[in-house]
């Protein structure tokens, strides 16, 4: 049964349970029930949905691993051609299994015929071709047999998944309806269930972060087993070569990342901070009501749009001023300055919105005391409000810096792809994030150091941004504790 149908069936049972639980309490006579009728309905609906959807999610996550492990064990080393890997063989297995499903779906083969396939597959290849499925002549009998096993295991798993999920939903429906009587504390049950769901959501976010870190650590460790860490952190040359002889020094990429981020902050911090001071101290309610939302629209623009803006507008504009026809400093539209300026525009709402909230949280008593001593509004802002809000503003700048360090699309379109150590802001450079994308795209062997270096770059960038975020949150928390 398709997952969507299964989801809708459980949802329909939950709706039926909600109505049934509510009606059972409202139609029963006698004393007043402990909770409102809606609590009884939600109690039944939660007992239907939570176990069923939890089983569905766990099954969908676990089944691919179990099926793949069984198929890989069945294939063994004999089915892996020289120069290939088990991952590529499994890709062929999945492709052939999808082809078998396509032929069954289009009526070119019955399910019984597909189940009987083992080694004689010439006719099968012809039928797959008729179905529009790409199946090359180099598919071995082992791969075809493994594809049929893969298909059978998935079909069996899907059948039992549907059965278990529906049984859990029906069991939860019956359990919830039997609890729908006046003495049952439905409100307490529902609130406890909601608390558990919220806790599970928080734990899921934490576990996801741990999983990301572990995946980075594992692949980074594998990379350093192939490529020495001393060369990675000690070389000033970035020259990957998928044929061998690569020099994978990180420093040109880190320099490009920091250089572009510094230019972006030079643009974003003054403009964002001045905008925040104006909105919080000078603008009236009507001006603030439309100016702040318009300023924050910049944060909602996709970064790919900023990248195209850098490539098509800012780059040619800078080239016309600083290029060969102008000052002669710039050779092409893609440069550090192009990416830095556009990234700075993107960061303005981050700085202005956070700084505005921090400035507004400064107690009014500080302003009143300054005005009472005869200070003007500008003197109060410079000598009282900004010093009091400085820790929070520093935290906002650090958060914007971490956002700038992790940006990719603006760099790809605006800064170029050259990994170099240069002080000229009109040279083309690249960043760590851009190289992560380039190293993981294409047909390179995933086990090669040229591909695994992306994880080492990602781990380095993760540590840098994590440090900035932790430092920023520490400063902001310290500031809030001081004035709350």
Image: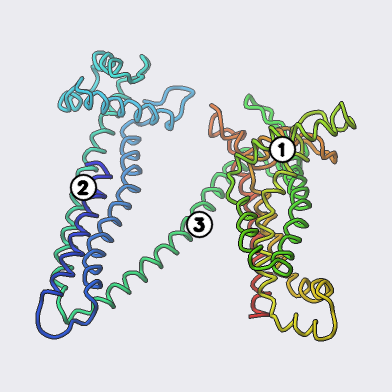
- Between the C-alphas of marks 3 and 1, the distance is 29 Å
Sequence-first disc among 3 and 1: 3
Q: Nearer the viewer, residue 261 or 30?
A: 30
The crowding category of the residue bearing disc 2, from other C-alpha atoms within 10 Å (few below 14, some 14 to 19, many at least 20), is: many
Residue at screen point 70% across, 80% down: 364
Q: Closer to the camera: disc 2 or disc 3?
A: 2
User: Which residue in the protein does label 3 denote?
Assistant: 210
The x and y percentages for residue 110 are: 16, 24
Residue 260: percent from left, percent from top: 75, 45
Alpha carbon distance from label 2 to label 1? 49 Å
- Label 1 SS: loop
Whether residue 13 sits left or right of residue 74 in the image: it is left
Whether 295 is drawn above or below 380: the answer is: above
Residues packed near mark 1 inside 10 Å, few (<14), some (14 to 19) or many (20 plus): many
* Residue linked to disc 2: 162
Is residue 23 found left or right of 428 in the rendered image?
A: left
Cα separation between marks 2 and 3: 31 Å
Height in image: 298 above or below 21?
Answer: above
Vertical side of 200 occupied by 25: above or below: below
Q: Secondary structure at mark 2?
A: helix
Q: Position of residue 434 (x, y in %)?
A: 65, 38
* Element at label 3: helix
User: Depth check: 293 or 128 in front?
Assistant: 293
Q: Where is residue 21 shown, x and y percent of the image?
A: 17, 68
Q: Which callout, 3 or 1, points to the residue nearer the camera?
A: 1
Q: Residue 226: name its quadrant.
A: top right
Tag shown at residue 430? 1
Total labels: the figure holds: 3
Task: Identify which residue is drawn at 31% across, 29% down.
Answer: 98
- Rendered residue at 47%/59% (across/down): 205
Compare marks 2 and 3 and give the one earlier in the sequence. Answer: 2
């Amino acid at each position: 049964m398709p997952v969507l149908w299964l989801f809708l069936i459980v949802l329909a049972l939950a709706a039926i349970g909600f109505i049934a639980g509510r009606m059972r309490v409202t139609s029963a006579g006698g004393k007043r029930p402990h909770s409102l009728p809606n609590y009884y309905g939600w109690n039944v609906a939660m007992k239907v949905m939570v176990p069923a959807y939890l089983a569905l999610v766990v099954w969908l996550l676990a089944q691919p691993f179990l099926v793949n492990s069984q198929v890989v064990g069945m294939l063994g080393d004999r089915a892996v051609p020289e120069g290939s890997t088990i991952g590529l063989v499994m890709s062929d297995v999945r492709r052939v299994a999808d082809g078998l499903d396509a032929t069954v779906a289009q009526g070119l083969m019955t399910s019984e015929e597909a189940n009987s396939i083992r080694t004689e597959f010439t006719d099968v290849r012809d039928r797959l071709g008729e179905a529009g499925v790409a199946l090359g002549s180099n598919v071995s009998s082992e791969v075809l047999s493994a594809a049929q096993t893969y298909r059978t295991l998935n079909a069996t798993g899907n059948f039992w998944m549907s059965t278990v999920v529906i049984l859990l939903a029906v069991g939860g429906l019956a359990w919830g309806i039997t609890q729908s009587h006046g003495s049952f504390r439905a409100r307490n049950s529902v609130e406890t269930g909601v608390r558990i769901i919220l806790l599970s959501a928080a734990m899921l976010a934490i576990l996801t972060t741990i999983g990301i870190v572990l995946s980075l650590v594992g692949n980074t460790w594998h990379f350093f087993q192939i490529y020495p860490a001393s060369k990675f952190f000690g070389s000033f040359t970035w020259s990957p070569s998928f044929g061998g002889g690569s020099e994978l020094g990180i420093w040109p990429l880190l320099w490009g990342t920091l250089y572009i981020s510094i230019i972006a902050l030079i643009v974003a911090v003054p403009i964002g901070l001045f905008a925040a001071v104006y909105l919080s101290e000078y603008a009236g309610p009507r001006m603030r009501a439309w100016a702040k939302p318009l300023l924050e629209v910049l944060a909602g623009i996709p970064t790919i749009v900023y990248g195209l803006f850098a490539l098509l507008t800012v780059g040619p504009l800078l080239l016309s001023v600083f290029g060969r026809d102008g000052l002669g400093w710039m050779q092409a539209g893609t440069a550090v300055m192009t990416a830095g300026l556009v990234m700075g525009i993107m960061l303005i709402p981050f700085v202005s919105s956070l700084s505005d909230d921090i400035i507004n949280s400064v107690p009014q008593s500080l302003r009143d005391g300054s005005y009472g001593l005869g200070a003007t509004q500008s003197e109060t802002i410079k000598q009282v409000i900004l010093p009091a809000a400085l820790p929070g503003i520093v935290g906002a700048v650090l958060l914007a810096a971490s956002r700038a360090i992790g940006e990719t699309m603006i760099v790809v379109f605006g800064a170029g792809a050259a990994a170099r150590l240069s002080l000229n802001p009109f040279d083309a450079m690249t960043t760590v994030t851009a190289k992560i994308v380039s190293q993981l795209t294409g047909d390179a062997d995933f086990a090669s150091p040229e591909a695994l270096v992306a994880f080492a770059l990602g781990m380095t960038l993760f540590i840098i941004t994590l440090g900035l975020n932790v430092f920023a949150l520490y400063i902001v928390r310290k500031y809030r504790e001081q004035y709350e």
